[in-house]
Image: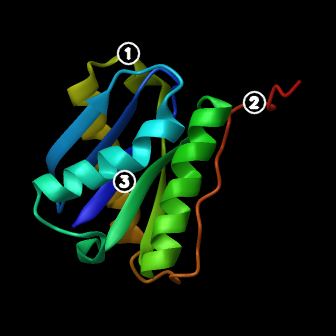
Amino acid sequence: MKLLIVTEDNKYLAVGIGNDRPEQIMVVDEKYQQSELLLDEIRQMLEQQRITVNDLEGIMVVNGPGDFSGLRIGVATANALAYGLGIRVVGVEMKSTWRKLAAEEKLEKIWKSGMKTYEKNKMASLNKWVEPEYGREPNIG
């Protein structure tokens, strides 16, 4: 099973799980709540699928462009889980045309793109990590 983490926009978060296609996707429309809700949503999804984190074989995460805080939360969570579980993590670039799509269609496209990247990098080292790509300079201050 593969896990998908989508936090590029501070207005929502989404997680998905599946193999070649997503079997379940959960979208939470809560502004600025990714850090509080992401791990709990992942836990709930795993419980609903009757699996544990040890059943995961890979993680896909949207790594940008997007909101600074949201991307950091999603990417850091994906990297930490992948490192701790000894599994592969890949970044998925959010295409600008996908932002205008309905949530379900957008998440299907993200999943498909993530799977292509995952399959292409299957032989890559497990020691790789994903870095966020903000698409602009961070606005801190």
Q: Residue 109, percent across and down? A: 29, 38
The amino acid beneath tag 1 is Lys
Q: How many marks?
A: 3
> Which residue was labeled with disc 1?
100
Q: Residue 48, percent across and down? A: 12, 52
> Which residue was labeled with disc 2?
136
The residue drawn where x is 17% and y is 60% is: 20
Q: Residue 119, percent across and down? A: 33, 69
> Which residue was labeled with disc 3?
114
Between 14 and 31, the one lying in front of the other is 31
The amino acid beneath tag 3 is Gly
Query: Between disc 3 and disc 2, whose residue precedes?
Result: 3
Q: Is residue 33 above or below residue 75?
A: above
**What is the crowding at mark 2: few (fewer than 14 residues within 10 Å), some, or many (at least 20)?**
few
Q: Is residue 70 above or below residue 141?
A: below
**What is the crowding at mark 3: few (fewer than 14 residues within 10 Å), some, or many (at least 20)?**
many
Residue 41 occupies which quadrant of the picture?
A: top left
Dot 3: what SS?
helix
Q: Quadrant of the N terminus?
A: bottom left
CA gap, disc 1 to disc 2?
20 Å
* Extreme residue in the right direction: 141
Query: Between disc 1 and disc 3, whose residue precedes?
Result: 1
The residue drawn where x is 31% and y is 19% is: 101
Pointers 1 and 2 in contact (C-beta within 8 Å)? no
The residue drawn where x is 65% and y is 55% is: 131
Question: Which label is found at residue 70?
Answer: none
Q: Is residue 32 above or below residue 119?
A: above
Dot 2: what SS?
loop
